[in-house]
Image (cartoon, rainbow, N blue to C red):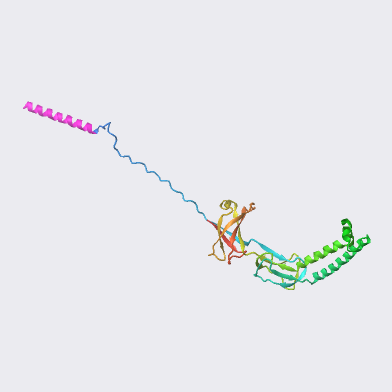
Amino acid sequence: MKSEEFATAIVFALTLVLTACKNEQRNEPVGNEPDTTTIQPAAIAKPVKKEAATATFNCKGTIMSVSEVAVASRINEQIVMLGVEMGQHVHKGQVVVRLDRTATEDKIVKGRAELERAEYQYQAILMGQGYKRGAFDQAPGDIREQARINSGYNTAKAALRQLEHQLTYCTIQAPITGMVTQLDAALYATAVPGVTLFRIVDTEHLKVSFDVLENELWRFEKGTAITVTPISYPDDHHQAKITAISPVVEKSGMIHLEATLTSHPRLMPGMSAIVTLK
């Protein structure tokens, strides 16, 4: 009995030793085996594509004519024909006003008579120096010139030429093609030199004029396209291009710009408009 109990005790001890060894092998890491632990990579942030800023610029402008001419008389005469009305379209070279020619024509008649008298005196001077009528060309040039001066021939001829030229002032033609505005003349009234009779505005060539702050100038350069919307017709949008930028910054910090416009029946000089730049 004792031998059986001893054998049983030995078997039980060996069993405990084997069990402990197996547990140690399970807990010990295997040095040669790679670490199979899965490492989750950190999330890589994708670059965010920045959208370009598209701020729209708006300001108020004024539609203007590229050319505007004040029509006035050069002489003091009565208006005997007024061939224009407010808003009338005229062409360059068209006769728009005629002035009374009577006084100027009378002066021309007197001027011609004065020239004839001076010419007779000129001939008398040369004949007095021994030159025959019809042979005055034989006289030296300095002698003939002195005779013209002494006879008053040169002065009379210049005065007549001036009167004949002044007669052309009695007919006033349109200097440009456009529309008649600011009509101040009246039929049979007296035209005074330098006083405007009316104005002609070129409505075929228009521009828009506007001012921007100095810090907004970077948006514009010659050739920059803009949109022009008349306040009177908010549904109309007209394209224009910058043609002029003032080289001077005003005391208020503003800079003046101009852009050409294509003519349109609804566009008129003096209109207010909204200038837009995207």
Residue 63 visible in rendering: no
Residue at 74% from the left image edge and 69% from the top image edge: 171
In the displayed structure, does residue 123 sit left or right of residue 31?
Answer: right
> In terms of image quadrants, where is residue 23?
top left
Q: Main secondary structure of the magenta part?
A: helix
Residue at 70% from the left image edge and 69% from the top image edge: 95
> In terms of image quadrants, where is residue 205?
bottom right
Q: Is residue 58 magenta?
A: no
For the N terminus, the quadrant is: top left
Q: Position of residue 233 (x, y in %)?
A: 55, 66
Residue interval drawn in magenta: 1-26
Camera-side residue of 157 and 137: 137
Residue 261 visible in rendering: yes
In the displayed structure, does residue 146 sit left or right of residue 260?
Answer: right
Q: Position of residue 154 (x, y in %)?
A: 85, 61
Q: Position of residue 97 (x, y in %)?
A: 72, 70
